[in-house]
Amino acid sequence: MKIRHYRPFFTGLLCLALCGGILFLTLIQGPSLRYLIGALLLAAMAGGNLWFACSEKDLETEIAGKIDERALFIAVQSGYMTLRILNGLLLAGALLALVAYGFTQSFSWIVVALTLFAVVLVLFVVLLCANCYCEKKY
């Protein structure tokens, strides 16, 4: 078995290490259903990533052979719409947290609002960097 793609290989190794850490934590603290479910999900992710690491084609090439232009356009549009909806929900949540702070004067609402505003800002920066990257690459 030859490793052909390194990114899924290292992701699989990371998932295996996290799975081992969760199982070790389960041994120390006693059995818990949430730890076992987490370990099972990480083991499944590790198996999938290690399988893709050894496959002949990478995931993008395998998917690209099965889609046409219409499916690609729909995927791009749905991703863009999802990003717009998520951005609107985060912004609305931050504004509602500010309104709740105005009514209750509780400091925890400010923390929630600042966290949501930070997520919106990070989302904007990531989108900007991705657009710049794609402009140069394609």
Image (spheres, grey):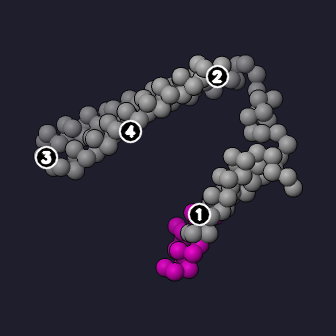
The image position of residue 59, as x and y in percent, is 75, 39
Q: Which mark is residue 49?
A: none
Q: Counting residues from the N terminus, which is met first, the one under dot 2 or under dot 4?
A: 4
Amino acid at dot 2? Lys
Magenta span of residues: 23-41
Q: Give the mark, 3 or 2, whose residue is nearer the N terminus.
A: 3
Query: Of callouts 1 and 4, which one flags the residue occurring earlier in the amino acid sequence?
Result: 1
Identity of the residue furthest to the front in this view? 136
Q: Quadrant of the N terminus?
A: bottom right
The question of residue 30 being in magenta is answered with yes
- Where is residue 110? Give x, y as percent: 22, 44
Question: Do the CB atoms of the residues marked 3 and 2 lie less than 8 Å apart?
Answer: no
Point out the frontmost of discs 1 and 3: 1
Assess disc 1: are there few (<14), some (14-19) or many (≥20) residues with their C-alpha within 10 Å of its C-alpha. some
Quadrant of residue 31 within the rendered picture: bottom right
Q: Is residue 62 visible?
A: yes
Q: Do callouts 1 and 4 mark residues in contact (Cβ within 8 Å)?
A: no
Which residue position is annotated with label 2?
Answer: 137
Q: Position of residue 44 (x, y in %)?
A: 68, 58
Q: Are marks 2 and 4 in contact (CB under 8 Å)?
A: no
Q: Earlier in the sequence, mark 2 or mark 1?
A: 1
Q: In the image shown, does 128 or 98 lie closer to the viewer?
A: 128
Q: Amino acid at mark 4?
A: Val
Nearer to me, 116 or 133: 133
Asked whether the viewer can see residue 89, the reply is no
What residue sits right under mark 1 in the picture? Answer: 18
Give residue 66's position: percent from left, percent from top.
79, 30
Which numbered dot is residue 104?
A: 3
What is the distance, in whole Å, between disc 1 and disc 3 at their CAs? Answer: 41 Å
Q: Report how far apart the C-alphas of labels 1 and 4 lie in the structure.
A: 26 Å
Q: Is residue 46 above or below residue 70?
A: below
